[in-house]
Image (tube, coloured by chain):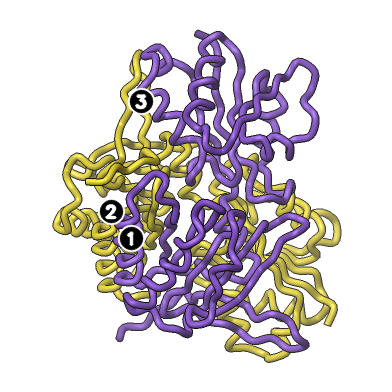
Chain colours: A yellow, B purple
Amino acid sequence: MSGSLAVVGLGPGDPDWITPETTAILAAAEEVLGYGPYLARLGPPREGQRRHASDNREEIARARHALDLAATGRRVAVVSGGDPGVFAMASAVFEAMEDGDPAWRALDVTVHPGVTAVLAAAARVGAPLGHDFCVVSLSENLKPWDLVLRRLDAAVAGDFVLALYNVASRARPWQLGAAFDRLRQSGRTGGTPVVLAAAVGRADERIVRATLADVDPAMADMRTLVLVGSSRTRCLARPDGRPPFVYTPRRVDPE
Amino acid sequence: MSGSLAVVGLGPGDPDWITPETTAILAAAEEVLGYGPYLARLGPPREGQRRHASDNREEIARARHALDLAATGRRVAVVSGGDPGVFAMASAVFEAMEDGDPAWRALDVTVHPGVTAVLAAAARVGAPLGHDFCVVSLSENLKPWDLVLRRLDAAVAGDFVLALYNVASRARPWQLGAAFDRLRQSGRTGGTPVVLAAAVGRADERIVRATLADVDPAMADMRTLVLVGSSRTRCLARPDGRPPFVYTPRRVDPE
């Protein structure tokens, strides 16, 4: 089989965050598959390139379709937002491969890194990830909520900065508020800086700086990435009404 | 003051992973500061651009120099490897700002995301970050080793995939072995997939796939990123002598 499948990510929103590698792969692809709004970000296909849009709950079907096309010798690209390995299509492709046609394992399948949302959200406010951090998806579509809670507890126990993905949707309105409650109960203090970063890199980008005591989870939607500081994360005030920088120092002195 | 300071990252090594935003900032900068080997990756400066190379232990001095230049009205860029917010220059800039001339806080200081090493290392082997993960620096230059151990324990307690930065150097030869020991003692099993990814995206890239039982920490150096799977991370065998894919499924079924 001479086909190939490349799994790529478009970054969080700004086209200037798409890597040249990904741009070249998408230009060369004969078949491009992805969630409709991601494909819409690509502009019109070049002559001879086919696009296959699908819904965002259909990752496994999309992955199987992509593997099938590659197995017929086509040059295929699967598109994610952000980085394809972080809560995105790369795992879905390998799940489909493991459960599917054994011949798929001989295909030339590659994954290509991109800018994941937490990096862009962090950059917008300063350097909150300047020290060790955890990345957790709040979606319990694919894992039990108890495991989410266990991980939030571990993040507090380790005093990690915390980045939360998939914090809210119409079908999942309560998870973010419950996560904030759990973090407070586990001992993260009310003054901890919290950032809600929505649609980063797009025209309707909105950044909200708050604290764990006063943050309103209803301000988050499905395009919001949430950062919760560690005990060391701090705000650096600025003059002239500019928003503060939020950052985590590199140094932790012994207690 | 009309100067500006942009903090950017060059990604882990492949020039095709540098974002167009960062390329444009570097082209426009009048002063570019960074660790010598990073500046060497940029090619010769355009006419009128000055370069300032410094050692990799001099982050705060470099940050102060950059802020000083911006305060004189210059257009300044500070360069990191990877993403500038992950164990890199962005935090150093805000530390220098907090302790320095109050006028620096009024400067136009921006941070711009890049591809951090863990994303590139993960992509090379499949999708090990397909689920929740932690990022920990093993350097105890800036924090007590006890805090590193506390965070490794928390990563095991939360069953996170673990990405380890700054795992080894000539001055720090024992930390990675001690970290593996701690993970085993904390209950991560011997069969857990471990990946050592050195110089990802460069001509001398080297990827080693191992398990927590048999991994040799002496194979890591200062350019190595280490991934340790969660209890769910698996290897997907492939035919014809190809290396297995390492991936973490998205789904965790209730126990």
Helix, strand, or loop for circle 3?
loop
Disc 1 sits on a residue from what chain?
B
Q: From the image, tell me which residue sits under label 3.
A: A243
Residue A43 visible to the viewer: no
Where's residue B8, x and y in %?
58, 35
Question: Which numbered disc flags the more N-terminal residue, 3 or 2?
Answer: 2
- Which kind of residue does numbered mark 3 sit on? Pro
Task: Report the residue that reaches farthest toward the bottom.
Answer: A102
Residue A122 visible to the viewer: yes
Instruction: Give the label, 3 or 1, closer to the camera.
Output: 1
The numbered dot on residue B29 is none
Q: From the image, tell me which residue sits under label 1.
A: B151
Where's residue B250, x and y in %?
46, 74
Residue shown at 52% from the left, 80% from the top: B211
Question: Would you identify the image quadrant in which residue B242 lies?
Answer: bottom right
Residue A255 position (above or below residue A8): above
Helix, strand, or loop for circle 1?
helix
- Whole-Å distance between the Cαs marked 1 and 2? 8 Å
Q: Nearer the viewer, residue A68 or A16?
A: A16
Q: Are the residues flagged by discs 3 and 1 from a single subunit?
A: no
Q: From the image, tell me which residue sits under label 2.
A: A159
- Whole-Å distance between the Cαs marked 3 and 1? 31 Å
- Which kind of residue does numbered mark 2 sit on? Asp
Disc 3 sits on a residue from what chain?
A
Circle 3/circle 2 CB separation < 8 Å? no
